[in-house]
Amino acid sequence: SHWAVDDAAKRPCVIFCHANSASRVQAVHYLALLLSLGCSVLALDFAGAGLSEGDVVTLGFREADDIAAAVQFLRGDARVSRIAGWGSSAGAAALLFCMAKYDAALACCVLDGSYADVRQVAACVEINQCVGCEDDAMIQHEHAVNLISAQVAAELAERSTVGGFSAPWPVAQAVIALLDASVRERAGVTLDELRPVARAPLCRAPALFLRATGDALLGAQHTEALARAYG
């Protein structure tokens, strides 16, 4: 969806990148602000979300390719002067991956609530919040499985414990490898690749980092780590 002021002036365009388990409809909450600033807004459904095809999400890693395609599309639009990005949650991670991978020439970006390293993400996903068809419920379940896998892997890697019980280091390593293989098989990525903080130093566009104070999933350390590593 592309919202724009109906006139002949060239205007900057903001690509809105939706959160995990969301869709381009999320951009509606930001339209009044962005349109009042004289910007147009392009919102897309990442692969596996909204009306887009696919049933696998990668928490921003492959979604970066969708953003790159949107940037290429806007560069061919005579109504667009400069291009900026606004990402929410996994959408912010997707922006980071995109800027690092494609050196996307964004004028600036807003990174709202991105995770820094998926291994540090707490597995508090409420599957019963999913609203929609059975396929959507399956996708939401996959999100939960992947995040829970990352949480267990992180606990093993850092403390060699699961649920407070000790695990011998060789066992811990084996379990981490199995979890990593499971995520790789389902989504085509590894846990080590889902680390926006490792890509942040490659990003160059001026960035504003945001985080909700009541965010129960991501602690402030994620935003702080990304801000320190950025650029």
Image: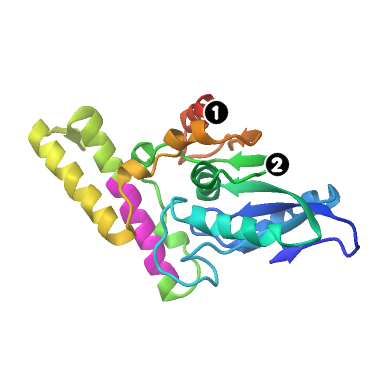
Q: Residue 8: x and y, percent? A: 90, 62
Q: Is residue 28 visible?
A: no
Residue 139: mark in rendering: none
Q: Main secondary structure of the magenta part?
A: helix
User: What residue is disc 2 on?
Assistant: 107
Viewer-nearest residue: 181 or 72: 72
Mark 1: give few (<14), some (14-19) or many (20+) Cα within 10 Å. some
Q: Residue 4's image quarter? A: bottom right
Q: Quarter of the image holding residue 192?
A: top left
Looking at the picture, does residue 78 appear above or below residue 172? Answer: below
Q: Residue at left 44%, top 55%?
A: 62
Q: Is residue 8 shown in magenta?
A: no
Dividing the image into 4 quarters, which one contains the C terminus? Answer: top right
Whole-percent x and y of residue 197?
A: 45, 34
Which of the two labelled residues, at mark 2 and mark 1, occupies the earlier sequence position?
2
Residue 2 in sight: yes
Tell me the residue at 33%/58% (across/down): 187
Q: Which residues are magenta?
A: 136-149
Q: Amino acid at mark 2?
A: Ala
Question: Neighbour class for label 2 at 10 Å: few (<14), some, many (≥20)?
Answer: some
The residue depicted at 55 percent of the width and 37 percent of the height is: 214
Q: What residue is shown with label 1?
A: 227
- Is residue 142 on the magenta stretch? yes
Left or right placement of residue 173 versus residue 36 in this view: left
